[in-house]
Image (tube, helix red, strand yellow):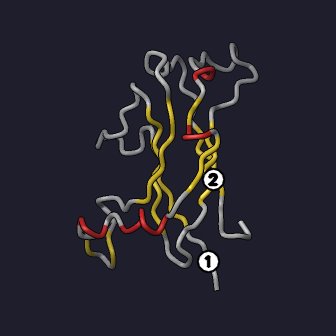
């Protein structure tokens, strides 16, 4: 953090009997993008300015590589069966975020059976947060 390169953890919630999409790989992706409902001083942001956050976010690295989630975590059968179960997580280290600018970040879990584009449940399989690196 002191070098302006924060690392955040993206953790998948426990879902009983969740199968990871017919044994297909799962991974996490992150991008800087303003959501459609984002407003600037009460006015909606035009479409051509929504991608500005991607430029301000800069490069990042993921651990494990490519944000891969091992299939060994699935299925989860509950606390009685999986006593010492730990939820899968991916670390994301942001390497060069534009300083003194608030950046909107969205990370998604990509799997065959997780719908991340459902407008009725905007946070299914994804998390959104704001990142700001303050430098004087």
Taking the spot 65% from the left edge, 64% from the top edge, the residue there is 5
Query: In the displayed structure, does residue 114 sit left or right of residue 17?
Result: left
Taking the spot 29% from the left edge, 59% from the top edge, the residue there is 36
Of residues 61 and 27, the one drawn nearer to the viewer in this rendering: 61
Circle 2 is placed at which residue position? 8
Query: In the displayed structure, does residue 6 sit left or right of residue 18?
Result: right
Q: Quarter of the image for the C terminus: give it.
A: bottom right
Measure the alpha-carbon separation of dots 2 and 1.
Answer: 17 Å
Badge 2, how many Cα within 10 Å: few under 14, some, many 20+? few
Q: Quarter of the image for the N terminus: give it.
A: bottom right
**Residue 97 in which image quadrant:** bottom right
Q: Position of residue 51 (x, y in %)?
A: 34, 64
Identify whether 67 is placed above or below 127: above
**Residue 4 in which image quadrant:** bottom right
The number of discs equals: 2
Circle 1 is placed at which residue position? 134
Taking the spot 58% from the left edge, 29% from the top edge, the residue there is 14
Badge 1, how many Cα within 10 Å: few under 14, some, many 20+? few
Query: In the displayed structure, does residue 65 sit left or right of residue 42?
Result: right
Identify whether 29 is placed above or below 18: below
Taking the spot 68% from the left edge, 20% from the top edge, the residue there is 79
Q: Position of residue 99 (x, y in %)?
A: 56, 76
- Does dot 2 land on a helix, a strand or a loop? strand
Identify whether 33 is placed above or below 39: above
């Amino acid at each position: 953090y002191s070098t302006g390169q924060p690392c955040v953890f993206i953790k998948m919630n426990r879902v009983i009997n969740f199968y990871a999409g017919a044994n297909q790989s799962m991974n996490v992706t992150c991008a800087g993008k303003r959501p459609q409902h984002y407003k600037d001083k009460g006015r909606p942001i035009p479409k051509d300015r929504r991608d500005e956050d991607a430029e301000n976010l800069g490069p990042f690295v993921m651990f494990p590589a490519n944000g891969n989630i091992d299939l060994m975590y699935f299925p989860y059968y509950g606390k009685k069966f999986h006593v010492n179960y730990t939820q899968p997580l991916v670390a994301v280290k942001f390497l060069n975020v534009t300083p003194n600018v608030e950046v909107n970040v969205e990370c998604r879990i990509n799997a065959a059976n997780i719908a991340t584009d459902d407008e009725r449940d905007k946070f299914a399989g994804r998390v959104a947060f704001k990142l700001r690196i303050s430098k004087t």
